Amino acid sequence: LIIILDFGGQYSQLIARRVREAKVYCEIVPYNHPIEKIKEKSPDGIILSGGPASIYAANSPKCSGKIFEMGVPVLGICYGNHLIAQHFGGNVKRSPSREYGITEVKINKSSLLFEGLENKMNCLMSHTDYIEKAPEGFNIIGSTEKCPVAAMENPKYKIYGVQFHPEVVHTEKGKEILSNFLFKICKCIGNWNMDDFIEFSINAIRNQIGKGKAICALSGGVDSSVAAVLVHKAIGDNLTCVFVDHGLLRKDEAKQVITVFKEKFHMNLIAVDAKERFLEKLKGITEPEKKRKIIGEEFIRVFEKEQKKLSGIEYLVQGTIYPDVIESGTGRAATIKSHHNVGGLPKDVNFQLVEPLRQLFKDEVRKVGKNLELPEEIVQRQPFPGPGLAIRVLGEVTEEKLKIVRESDFIFRDEIKKANLEKEIWQYFALLPGVRSVGVMGDERTYSYTVALRAVTSTDGMTADFAKIPLDILEKISNRIVNNVENVNRVVYDITSKPPSTIEWE
Ligand code: XMP
């Protein structure tokens, strides 16, 4: 196990990803994670991430100095490197000129960290501070034109530091450097895989819950589904899942969730049909934020009602994944949309949380799901917003409009599947802007709805480009929608990226 102490760097997640790609399990914890807890885990090595702060600034984030007395190898990256330098009495200050971008670093190949590499390589540098003087006992093993200590080591204590970022692909040989740290310095074995994770987490869940009872709000999305199956493996029937069908799901989705979890996994599943309740609350509401708030709140009310019917529940299972932890941790971002998902449930109830996927990235969660034999439709499911189709029917939500979106969306998805484009497009769906226009069908004038199609490529949903779906496929989709979905006479394709647009229209 490798522990990564996160000092808020933009690449902390990438470090974790690279370590796991080398088949070594790692966990990211905040920089001030208690030293006793770190010791309890007996890590084979510790990596100190980069971060935006200056080490000499007041209140700069610091970890316990005892980290360096554990006898465990440490690698500091960028800010982590400054922290090592300062701790051991070196000198860190603002560099006379910032170094930002790909820079040539001359290295000393005799260091274990650089074993097997050439004398120089291109690395990504991104810093305003630098180490002017390495601490006593440390060898300088790398430098650039502007940075005298681009890498340093204290082989006796197995402490290493680099100013550049070995975790990004722009750093040539970054992978090799991390591998040297993991295998040559920390002596990791590199045989970790998803099955190990599953076994490890089932044991951890059993330890946490014991004979207690847990509840899980299941949406049918990847994260909550995988979390539920994992916890079910650990505690069996002491887990009850609550699936709230708010009537805003896509075609056949509710049926699919119920079949998979009840019939395939034989789980205790309470499926609540709350369609009418939600539609009633949404009647006459046109403002997007108001719609989102109503749905989020109603969700909690329904969940609470079900939970009260059960007795002795102490634990709440949530499908929180690593990016959720990061996003909720910053708390600085402006509210563009108030996101609602089952992961945000419920704040005021006295449950202990069980979050088995907290350390994983989305693609890793998918791998776990696959190993747990969850069906492809769930494992590969595209992101779907908690408020569902309510935010894809612009303005007031009605049964009639939901039906149009549901049918059009089904056709769109089916054609994308047939065209084999599923893996290339990150998210694709139909929506109803609510405008009607004039058309002609079989000599008759029509005055019907316009359906909009939205499809984007993205890696994390934070930024996105509209997907360049071939025109002949768009044509096919448009024809099929107009010919099969009642009350639609026009289909348009959204060709804006995010920003300035968002992915969803509301
Ligand atoms: P936007 O529209 O903000 O969407 O560009 C970014 C991604 O987030 C999804 N989304 C949501 N997911 N609850 C969720 O769980 C929500 O309330 C929500 N709103 C948007 C959206 O589908 C896209 O993938």
Image (cartoon, rainbow, N blue to C red):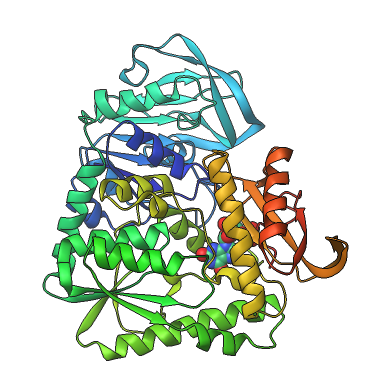
Picture residue at 28% right of the left edge, 33% below the top: 23
Residue 26, picture quadrant? top left
- Quadrant location, the C terminus: bottom right
- The residue nearer to you, when weighing 74 against 321, is 321
Answer with left or right where residue 224 lies relative to residue 354. Answer: right
Q: Nearer the viewer, residue 312 or 64?
A: 312
Considering depth in this image, is 98 or 4 the residue closer to the camera? Answer: 4
The x and y percentages for residue 326 are 47, 56
Q: Residue at x 37, y 90 (%)?
A: 305
Quadrant holding the N terminus: top left
Instruction: Please say if 359 is above or below 239.
Output: above
- Relative to residue 485, is residue 57 drawn left or right? left
The quarter of the picture where residue 209 lies is bottom left
Q: Mark yes or no: residue 8 visible.
A: yes
Left or right: residue 499 versus residue 132 is right
> Is 239 placed above or below 126 here?
below
Does residue 461 show up? Answer: no
Q: Residue furthest left?
A: 211
Vertical order, 96 against 418 (above or below): above
Residue 429 position in % (x across, y down): 61, 56
Closest to the observer, 505 or 279: 279
State whether residue 103 is above or below residue 258. Answer: above
Image location (x, y in percent) of residue 249? 51, 69
Q: Whereabouts is ligand 1, in terms of quadrant?
A: bottom right
Q: Count every numbered label the image shows and give the total.
A: 0
Picture quadrant of residue 258: bottom left
Q: Position of residue 135 (x, y in %)?
A: 40, 31
Q: Position of 39 compared to 170: left or right?
A: left
Q: Residue furthest front?
A: 443
